[in-house]
């Protein structure tokens, strides 16, 4: 992993929303990089800022502060035309494959629209390319004149994937791409994403609610809590030796298939709900629910530190 070059570099990225007189710090100073060909999993409870991070990273939202570099070049100050060209490199796949597809457009036009925006093909070439993309995601190319409602949930997600792939991107933010699907089709879509990654050298940021889902697909995993990244490590290291109490709690919620171990394992039950991001606790945002909280956790924000090689965490236990 280490000898792969860096595709995406995120530096002190912030995205704040103004709601009335309040500021909601949806993403509050996160820094990380994603290597070419890598899958970075991003997990955390609802509202912790995963989607906002993904969107700000692609400049679908303007960042409040910070920088995003693609192949070493900042995308933050690109003008409209430069950004349009950049968008070919960076695509997004959404959670709800139905809401993200225009119900009045045929599948061929949905995919073709992506080709049109970037003038990638016209006439017969366009049709062939659409059919090629449908085949690539294991859909019947002859169904290009059908509408989204004529497909199942899993098939609709494949259409969303084909649309993203139409522009031959290098990087795709997959925002909970399987959460809305039946369990039986989730694995198929994950397998498809992995095959496509292999074939096309794609780099993924893969957002999910729970850790069990990203373990299988991710090279490294980042854990978010209330707009902050609290831990980041290679998947194996994160699962075998989670450092942050929040990660430990998330992991302890995953059932273990071995009944003997499952019976005896320790479960950490988090107290209460995630506090409002409008008014997060002082110091470490997690301290109000943390079983290991100490007085200093209220006093100061823990630094983001590399605690073991490649294993980062922000927690006063390690300061
Ligand atoms: N456009 C917006 N305007 C105002 N607030 C927003 C906007 N988008 C997100 N937020 C708020 O920012 C915070 C982070 O939201 P976000 O959708 O990024 O979380 P998430 O981790 O993706 O959650 P989920 O798992 O439910 O998808 C939430 O408090 C949310 O209400
Ligand atoms: Mg989300």
Image: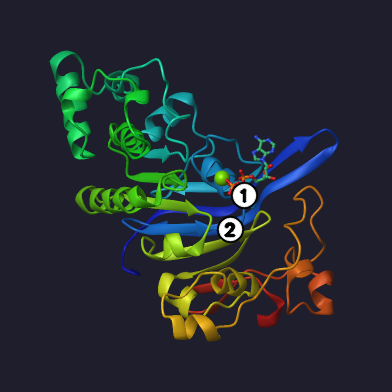
Helix, strand or loop under label 2: loop
Q: Where is residue 263? Give x, y as percent.
A: 53, 83
Determine whether, in the image, residue 170 is placed left or right of residue 228.
left
Asked if residue 23 is positioned above or below residue 284 in the image, the reply reads: above
Residue at 61 percent across and 56 percent down: it is 45
Asked if residue 74 is positioned above or below residue 271 in the image, the reply reads: above
Residue at 30 percent across and 32 percent down: it is 167
Q: Residues within 10 Å of mark 1 (few under 14, many from 20)?
A: many
Residue at 46 percent across and 75 percent down: it is 256
Asked if residue 60 is positioned above or below residue 4 in the image, the reply reads: above
Q: Quadrant of residue 162?
A: top left
Asked if residue 49 is positioned above or below residue 292 in the image, the reply reads: above
Q: Does the numbered disc 1 mark a residue whose Cβ is under 8 Å from ligand 1?
A: yes
- Mark 2 — residue? 44
- Callouts 1 and 2 close, C-beta under 8 Å: yes
**Residue 310 appearing in the image:** no
- Image quadrant of ligand 1 equals top right
Q: Where is residue 310? Give x, y as percent.
A: 47, 74
Camera-side mark, 1 or 2: 2
- Mark 1 — residue? 49
Q: Residues within 10 Å of mark 2 (few under 14, many from 20)?
A: many
Q: Where is residue 146? Give x, y as percent.
A: 27, 20
Of residues 76 and 177, which is closer to you in this image?
Answer: 177
Determine whether, in the image, residue 198 is placed left or right of residue 68.
left
Q: Does the numbered disc 2 mark a residue whose Cβ is under 8 Å from ligand 1?
A: yes
Determine whether, in the image, residue 223 is placed left or right of residue 21.
left
Image disc number at residue 92: none
């Amino acid at each position: 992993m280490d000898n792969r070059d860096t595709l995406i570099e995120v530096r002190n990225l912030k995205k704040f929303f103004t709601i009335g007189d309040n500021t909601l710090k949806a993403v509050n100073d996160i820094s990380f990089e994603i290597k070419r060909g890598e899958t970075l999993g991003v997990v955390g409870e609802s509202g912790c800022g995963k989607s906002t991070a993904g969107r700000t990273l692609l400049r679908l939202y303007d960042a409040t502060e910070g920088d995003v570099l693609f192949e070493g070049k900042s995308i933050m100050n690109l003008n409209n035309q430069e950004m349009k060209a950049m968008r070919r490199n960076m695509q997004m796949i959404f959670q709800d494959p139905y809401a993200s597809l225009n119900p009045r457009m045929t599948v061929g036009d949905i995919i073709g629209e992506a080709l049109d925006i970037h003038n990638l093909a016209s006439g017969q070439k366009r049709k062939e390319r659409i059919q090629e993309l449908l085949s690539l995601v294991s859909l019947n190319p002859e169904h290009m004149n059908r509408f989204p409602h004529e497909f199942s949930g899993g098939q609709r997600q494949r259409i969303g994937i084909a649309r993203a792939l139409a522009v031959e991107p290098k990087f795709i933010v997959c925002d909970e791409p399987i959460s809305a699907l039946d369990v039986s089709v989730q694995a198929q879509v994950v397998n498809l994403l992995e095959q496509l990654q292999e074939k096309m050298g794609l780099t993924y940021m893969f957002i999910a609610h729970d850790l069990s889902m990203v373990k299988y697909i991710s090279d490294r995993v980042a854990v978010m809590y209330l707009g902050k990244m609290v831990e980041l490590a290679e998947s194996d290291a994160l699962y075998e030796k989670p450092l942050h109490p929040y990660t430990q709690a998330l992991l302890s919620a995953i059932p273990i298939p071995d009944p003997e171990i499952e019976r005896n394992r320790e479960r950490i039950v988090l107290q209460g709900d995630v506090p409002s991001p409008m008014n997060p606790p002082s110091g470490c945002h997690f301290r109000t629910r943390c079983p290991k909280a100490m007085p200093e956790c209220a006093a100061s924000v823990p630094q983001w530190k590399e605690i073991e090689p490649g294993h980062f965490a922000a927690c006063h236990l390690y300061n």
